[in-house]
């Protein structure tokens, strides 16, 4: 048996990738199961999904804690969490990034495959949905299923949901990714400080759990404390304001779901710490002063 | 009241975890700017609760409480009465979703309205149980594909039409009922301000397009709200004591087809289904405007 853990963001299709991979293995006569992590995750928030493959019936139903392979659909996730957690000694990590495996820094050096799935998806599908491209990379990196089975599984799974043409386009994305995947060894040495949690004792807990604003070891809790939760790493596209064109009408300021646009000298100014890149501001700007650009991260 | 009259200071912080392109945080933030600091907020189970109030973290800068799904009306009643007894002037607001209003919360809401409690009830309507993964509600429009009304070969999405909740509330003859859309800022803000200044039970119903559940690109949220108004799928009006006092008429009524076209939940629509939905819009139009569209 081997196990794969998918790290993605809600809406990127991590669950569909896990299911399509299971289907590809099934088409080759294996037993396979897949399921997502259940939680209150929204589109854009970090999520996980799991796939197990075996030659015999699979009885185990737990989440995957010690995977053979880790798949990362969104490069920004390797900055905030240790995706290698529990990875087996000879395990491998497959990452969507424009970098070469040798340029990727993780908590320790491990076998690593990389592919720029976002660019492939944008080019072929026109949308930054990377779940099918990454499947091609898994086939190449692991050699556990053939790219033909991956294509068949994608056409069956995505074709049923999105129509035949979309199914075939997604299969093509997988094929292109298969050909472009690089395999090597990552760098190590990246340190992760586990996020602290606020765990008050019974005595410390206020009556009814009601809290004002408290500064704790785990950061701010209570009223207004979400301000410490930076959601800027959710985005793929970044709004760029042309200050010359901006007429200070405040429509974007009003419409922005994050409330991360402020008016500086009567011009729209985006706080990129929080912007999720939805693009409403650019779509609604009456003078087209805002443009959504593909974000390049260092 | 216009956008430029709104204060800079926000009582709803960024950093909340709503999906990119969600209309609800923009609705809530702008409403809170008018409601002001002396407000206490209640929410039942809904997306808003999960993305803005994941204990111990909160995006709100006012007292905020979470209650059970069905009793928003009862909770805001109790709190409003407690403050009256204490002689304190506090605005009591409940923010519920369409599931918590149309289906699960309607009895407590109806009771609170009938007793004319001094509170504001806001229904932000994204037309399904989005929080639990897009299940149909009484607010889901005809034909929409949801996880409990999946469009397939036998059943073409939801078979029933959307319930007219604002009209049910108008029939309670409460001091103020208004339907709002985030795409019409001036109208939106004036209604919120009016609700704040009115005494007794006030019901605000705002359409909240959901890119995840309606399946459209997150940048189109406001556009969807605007098209809903222009097509007559969503009607903006105010009613005082049961009488409509102000109704907005789109300058040019667009066919319902224009509205549904960009949304994945209507992707399977046949010409007959479009006609059926158009008939529903036209009936509603005639009832509210008193003339044929």
Image (tube, rainbow, N blue to C red):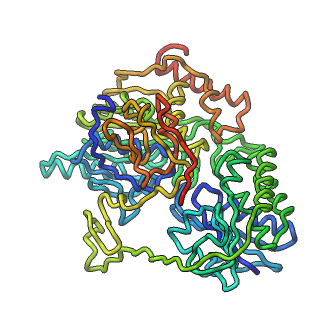
Q: Is residue A57 left or right of residue B191?
A: right
Q: Is residue A81 left or right of residue B120?
A: right
Reply above or below: B4 against A190.
above
Residue A186 visible in rendering: yes
- Quadrant for the C terminus of chain B, please: top right
Q: Is residue B145 left or right of residue B283?
A: right
Q: Position of residue A32 (x, y in %)?
A: 77, 72
Q: Position of residue B196 (x, y in %)?
A: 26, 37
- Quadrant for the N terminus of chain B, please: top left
Residue B139 visible in rendering: no
Which residue is rendered at x = 73% and y = 57% of the image? A132
Which residue is rendered at x = 81% and y = 58% of the image? A175
Q: Position of residue B155 (x, y in %)?
A: 72, 42
Query: What is the count of numbered marks?
Result: 0
Most foreground residue, B14 or A191: A191
Q: Residue furthest left?
A: B87
Q: Residue furthest top?
A: B291
Which residue is rendered at x = 58% and y = 37% of the image? B141
Which residue is rendered at x = 65% and y = 67% of the image? A95
Reply above or below: B19 against B122.
below
Reply above or below: B293 against A117.
above
Q: Quadrant of residue B109?
A: top left
Most foreground residue, B108 or A181: A181
Q: Position of residue B124 (x, y in %)?
A: 43, 42
Q: Is residue A32 left or right of residue A244?
A: right
Q: Residue furthest bottom?
A: A89
């Amino acid at each position: 048996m081997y196990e794969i853990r998918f790290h993605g963001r809600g809406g990127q299709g991590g669950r569909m990738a896990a299911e399509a991979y299971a289907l590809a293995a099934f088409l080759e006569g294996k037993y396979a199961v897949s399921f997502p992590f259940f939680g209150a995750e929204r589109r854009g928030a970090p999520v996980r999904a799991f796939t197990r493959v075996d030659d015999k019936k699979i009885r185990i139903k737990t989440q995957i804690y010690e995977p053979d392979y880790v798949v990362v659909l969104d490069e920004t996730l390797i900055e905030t969490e240790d995706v290698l957690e529990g990875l087996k000694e000879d395990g491998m990590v497959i990452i969507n990034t424009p970098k070469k495996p040798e340029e990727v820094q993780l908590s320790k050096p491990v076998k690593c495959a990389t592919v720029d799935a976002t660019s492939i998806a944008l080019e072929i599908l026109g949308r930054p949905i990377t779940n099918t491209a990454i499947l091609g990379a898994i086939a190449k990196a692991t050699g556990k299923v053939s790219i033909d089975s991956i294509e068949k599984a994608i056409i069956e799974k995505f074709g049923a949901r999105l129509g035949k043409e979309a199914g075939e386009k997604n299969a093509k994305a997988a094929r292109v990714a298969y050909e472009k995947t690089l395999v090597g060894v990552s760098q190590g040495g990246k340190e992760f400080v586990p996020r602290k949690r606020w765990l008050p004792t019974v005595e410390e807990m206020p009556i009814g759990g009601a809290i004002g604003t408290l500064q704790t070891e785990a950061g701010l809790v209570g009223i207004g404390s979400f301000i410490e939760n930076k959601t800027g790493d959710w985005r793929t596209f970044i709004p760029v304001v042309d200050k010359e064109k901006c007429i200070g009408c405040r429509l974007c300021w009003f419409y922005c779901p994050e409330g991360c646009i402020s008016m500086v000298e009567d011009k729209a100014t985006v706080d990129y710490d929080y912007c999720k890149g939805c693009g409403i501001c650019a779509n609604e700007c009456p003078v087209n002063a805002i443009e959504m650009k593909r974000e390049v991260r260092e | 009241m216009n956008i430029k009259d709104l204060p800079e200071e926000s009582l709803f912080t960024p950093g909340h975890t709503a999906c990119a392109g969600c209309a609800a945080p923009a609705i809530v933030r702008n409403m809170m700017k008018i409601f002001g600091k002396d407000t206490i907020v209640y929410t039942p189970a809904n997306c808003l609760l999960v993305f803005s109030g994941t204990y111990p973290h909160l995006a709100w800068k006012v007292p905020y409480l979470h209650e059970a799904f069905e009793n928003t009306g009862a909770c805001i009643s109790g709190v409003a009465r407690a403050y009256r007894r204490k002689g304190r002037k506090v605005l009591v607001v409940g923010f519920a979703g369409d599931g918590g209003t149309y289906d699960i919360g309607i009895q407590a809401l109806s009771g609170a309205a009938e007793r004319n409690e001094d509170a504001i009830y806001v229904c932000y309507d994204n037309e399904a149980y989005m929080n639990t993964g897009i299940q149909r509600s009484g607010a889901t429009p005809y034909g929409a594909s949801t996880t409990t009304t999946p469009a397939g070969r036998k059943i073409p999405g939801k078979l029933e039409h959307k319930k007219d909740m604002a009209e049910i509330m108008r029939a309670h003859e409460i001091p103020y009922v208004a339907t709002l859309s985030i795409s019409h800022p001036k109208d939106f803000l004036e209604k919120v301000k009016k609700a704040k200044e009115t005494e007794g039970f006030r019901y605000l119903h705002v359409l909240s397009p959901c890119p995840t559940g309606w399946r459209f690109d997150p940048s189109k949220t406001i556009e969807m709200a605007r098209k809903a108004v222009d097509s007559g799928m969503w009607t903006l009006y105010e009613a005082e004591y049961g009488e409509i006092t102000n109704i907005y008429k789109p300058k040019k009524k667009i066919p319902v087809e224009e509205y549904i076209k960009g949304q994945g939940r209507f992707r399977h629509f046949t010409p007959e289904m479009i006609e059926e939905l158009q008939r529903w819009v036209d009936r509603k139009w005639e009832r509210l405007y008193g003339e044929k569209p």
